[in-house]
Amino acid sequence: MQRIGVFVCHCGTNIAATVDVKAVAEALKNETGVVFSTDYQYMCSESGQNIIKDAIRDYKLSGVVVCSCSPRMHEATFRKAVASVGLNPYMLEVANLREQCSWIHKDIATATDKAIVLGKAAIAKVHLNAPLTAGESPVIKRALVIGGGIAGIQSALDIADAGFEVDIVEKEPTIGGKMTQLDKTFPTLDCAACILTPKMVECSQNDKIKIYSYSEVADVKGFVGNFTVSIKKKARYVDETKCTGCGLCTEKCPMKKVPNAFNMGMNNRSAIYIPFAQAVPKVATIDADYCNMLKNGKCGVCAKVCTAGAINYKQQDEIIEEKYGAIIVATGYNPIKLDKYDEFAYSQSKDVVTSLEFERLTNAAGPTNGTLLRPSDGKHPHTIVFVQCVGSRCDDSRGKPYCSKICCMYTAKHAMLTREKYPDTEVYVFYIDVRTPGKNFDEFYRRAVEEYGVHYIKGMVGKVTPKADGTLDVQASDLLSNEQLHIDADLVVLAAAIEPDKSARPLATMLTASMDTNDFFTEAHPKLRPVESPTAGIFLSGACQGPKDIPETVSQAGAAASKAIGLLCKNSLTCNPCVAHSDELMCNGCSSCEKVCPYGAITYINKEFKMPDRTTAIRRVASVNPAVCQGCGACTVACPSGAMDLNGFSNSQIMAEVDAICK
């Protein structure tokens, strides 16, 4: 018979405001095996932990039940406390009275009754608990950063500076991400390239950093400290070790009508191209969809003019397998498509552009060499209307329910720079709210209004109509003056909402990482573990977790790197002893468990069994590698014969909890 102690936490008023904690402690005192039961205001505090430790010593407790907040919050704290006085940490159970009870009930009587039931279930499980011993697994001292934007670059540099090897996997031919397409950055109006390019070069020259550009993560297996990652290195049809980046092939290529994705399709490039002048690596890439040689075998000009002999039309995709101890996700964002917003005439007029397209129109390396010209006729626009929150903060199916966070500031930047460079231009900004939460952000916005004379109008644009004279009729409302407005604009700029990169969802599946309904990666805890994924060893950097500006992105990238460095500094990690095991006598070798295991921990072996007639039979049975198993329990659910079970969460323990609840 177990000697169990019960400790009920008030959690300030988080639990005590809805649950009669003293009544819970008193009720649980009468359960079988309970020899001590008490309550305390903050059980996770040092004083609360000392109450638990003293009770274990004084009452010779063999099991502990703490009725408090979620096990995700403080289970490790309480396990450490009981282990410090000699009790096996896996003889402790946490009953969640906060998230599962007090926070979802308003009636005290109902919440108190439920809290007692949750406590009884935990006590029933403790009766069947057995001491578990955690093993150890080595840590591979190498990190992987998925995504080569400013977030991935900063994380990689910080890890490399700590002395660890790190690989960057970037799906585009060059690292740099969205920041390479920007002209200036707010609130300092620094040149984006001047900030980013040195970091890109530093990455390429750092001996600890290896860049896999034009590559994607194809598969991820393993666990924290020991991930095995398959990287698909796509065929460039150019040998990176030979290409000098001279650009002669791009000049001589006869196919020059390929939409230039780097300039948002507003001009053309050749079929073989280098994305931009400061690309890293500065290596040409052949676009197989447009190359005449690859499509029909007729051309070969680039191979003829390449003095380095770098062109290889027979190059194939390559799969590279590497091992890593930690993975940082930095997959970034993209503006949403605006094909559902016909009221703004985006698909009808070339003079309705997105904010990122406007960036390229004002960039010295853009399609107009930095001169602001209308895409339709190449003339200078004299009236520009900026429309905020296009697709952000929407309650319909077209857009996103969240604020995209960066739009207010980059629109202020665009308006300010336009007025500074072209004082004859009238600039209007239609907004719902102006949100400027960062350091010096509000001052930046006020400069646009007070110093540069930008017309900020609180209201919504209802419709944009192209007119016969080439201008755009912008119909809008001014909510402050309660007037309907018609503005003849030469250019309309839409601040499109941002969303996670499309690669995020399949990548999360490979990493067994959590995502929210908007496909942003979910952090382990928004306050205590903001850069960690709930999956151990996976860290989050930048806009893959939510909309962020550059300063916030760089800060989080450094934080994610520090977490990864803390992991890589360890020679070994304590394994989770709550792993699956197979009852070989019950296993029928059906492979159901192997198919559902996300970590590849289950294999099948042929094993000899002695039969009643003393003959030997060979049967195929499941075998679990405890170093790889992460205790998710998927196999126990899938097993049709009930042969698979989970240490610490066995079928008998779960059923004991169910029985306690149903009594």
Image (spheres, helix red, strand yellow):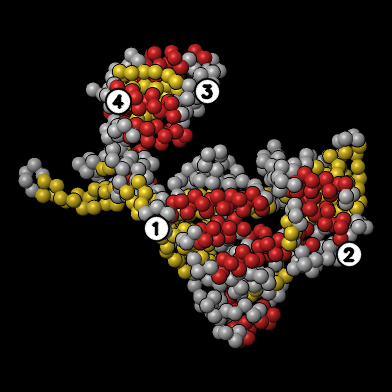
Is residue 140 toward the left or the right of residue 287 in the image?
Answer: left
| Mark 2 nearby-residue class (10 Å; few <14, some 14–19, many ≥20) | few
Crowding near pointer 1: few (<14 within 10 Å), some, many (20+)?
Answer: many
What label does residue 12 carry, if any? 3
**CA gap, disc 2 and disc 1:** 58 Å
Q: Which mark is residue 514?
A: none
Q: Can I make out residue 472 in this image?
A: no
The amino acid type found where label 3 is placed reads: Gly
Location of residue 240 in the rendering, given as x and y in whole percent from the top left corner? 54, 75
Q: Position of residue 627 (x, y in %)?
A: 32, 49
Select label 1 or label 4 by which is in front: 4
- The alpha-carbon separation of the residues under discs 3 and 1 comes to 42 Å
Disc number placed over residue 140 in the picture, else none? 1
Real-space CA distance between mark 1 and mark 4, rounded to the nearest whole angstrom: 40 Å
Amino acid identity at mark 1? Ile
The circle drawn on residue 379 is: 2
Mark before the other along the chain sequence, 1 or 4: 4
Front in this rendered view, residue 370 or 73: 73
Q: Secondary structure at mark 3?
A: loop
Mark 2 or mark 1, which has the lower sequence index?
A: 1
Determine whether, in the image, residue 607 is placed left or right of residue 388: left
- Name which residue lies at 23% across and 22% down: 1
CA gap between label 3 and label 2 equals 66 Å
- Can you say which quadrant of the picture contains the C terminus? top left
Q: CA distance from mark 2 to mark 4?
A: 84 Å
Dot placed on the residue nearer the N-terminal end, 3 or 2: 3
Pointer 2 or 4: first along the chain: 4
Q: Which residue is mark 4?
A: 57
Question: Which badge, 4 or 3, is on the more N-terminal residue?
Answer: 3
